[in-house]
Amino acid sequence: MNTYGSSWIFADPSDNISTPGYTVHTIPVVEQGCDCGLTPKCTKEFFGIKYGCYVTEAFSQLPMACLYDAKCVDKSGNNNSLSNPGNSSRFSINTTYEALLSELMVENLIHDLDYEIYFSKCKPSLCIYKKSNFKEGIIELISLYGGVAIICRLIAVILVKLIRRRSVEITPVTD
C-alpha cells in the first residue's frame, strides 16, 4: 500500500464492525481491468498527470519528452521546462525512463582491459595464481569439516564438565 492509496485500499469493515477481534484487510485496486495486486504496471491519467499502483512505476512509463514539455512537467503554469534536449544521445526523446534505467543510463560503454597499466600503477610485490583441482577441493572441504567437528567436541566437553561441577556441589548443613 502506498501513501496515495492508489495500489491497495482498506476493505469496508461495516459488515464486521461489531465482531470482536476483527482484523482490517486490504484489497487491491482494480481499474479499467488492471489489478494492482497482480501487476504494478497499471497507470492511469488524472488531469494530465500519470499515476499508478506505485509512483515509481507511473514515472517509469513517462517518455523523456515530458521533461522538455512545460505542460507535462509543471502543472502550475510556471514555464521552467528544458527547451532543448541538448546533446545528442543514443536514446530517443520518446524513450521511457524504464527503458533508460534498464540500460543503466549508459550512453557508451568502453570496455578496455589493460593489465599492464593496472600492474604499473598498483605495483604488487607478489602475484600468485593457483588452480585447484577437484581432489584438492574435496580434501580441503573434509579437513575444514574435521576441524570444525573437533572444536565443537572440545567446547561440548568443557560445557558438560562445567554443568556437572555446578550441580554436584554439596553444601554442609549444621544444626
Image (cartoon, rainbow, N blue to C red):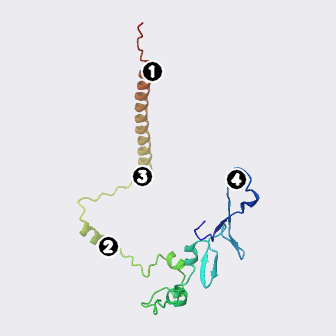
Q: Residues within 10 Å of mark 3 (few under 14, many from 20)?
A: few
Residue at numbered disc 4 = 22
Residue at numbered disc 2 = 114
Q: CA distance from mark 1 to mark 2?
A: 68 Å
Mark 1 and 3 residues: CB-CB less than 8 Å, in contact?
no
Q: Identify the residue shown where x is 42% and y is 81%.
A: 108
**Element marked by disc 2:** loop
Q: CA distance from mark 2 to mark 3?
A: 29 Å
Rendered image quadrant of residue 1: bottom right
User: Residue 128's x, y, as percent?
Assistant: 30, 57
> Vertical placement of 78 versus 129: above or below?
below
Amino acid type, label 3: Asn
> Vertical placement of 88 versus 17: above or below?
below
Q: Earlier in the sequence, mark 4 or mark 3?
A: 4
Q: Identify the residue shown where x is 25% and y is 58%.
A: 126
Rendered image quadrant of residue 117: bottom left
The one of 7 and 33 positioned closer to us in this rendering? 7
User: Residue 79's x, y, as percent?
Assistant: 48, 91
Residue furthest to the bottom: 83
The one of 149 and 59 positioned closer to us in this rendering? 59
Q: Residues within 10 Å of mark 4 (few under 14, many from 20)?
A: few
Residue at numbered disc 3 = 133
Amino acid type, label 1: Ser
Mark 4 and 1 residues: CB-CB less than 8 Å, in contact?
no
Q: Earlier in the sequence, mark 2 or mark 4?
A: 4
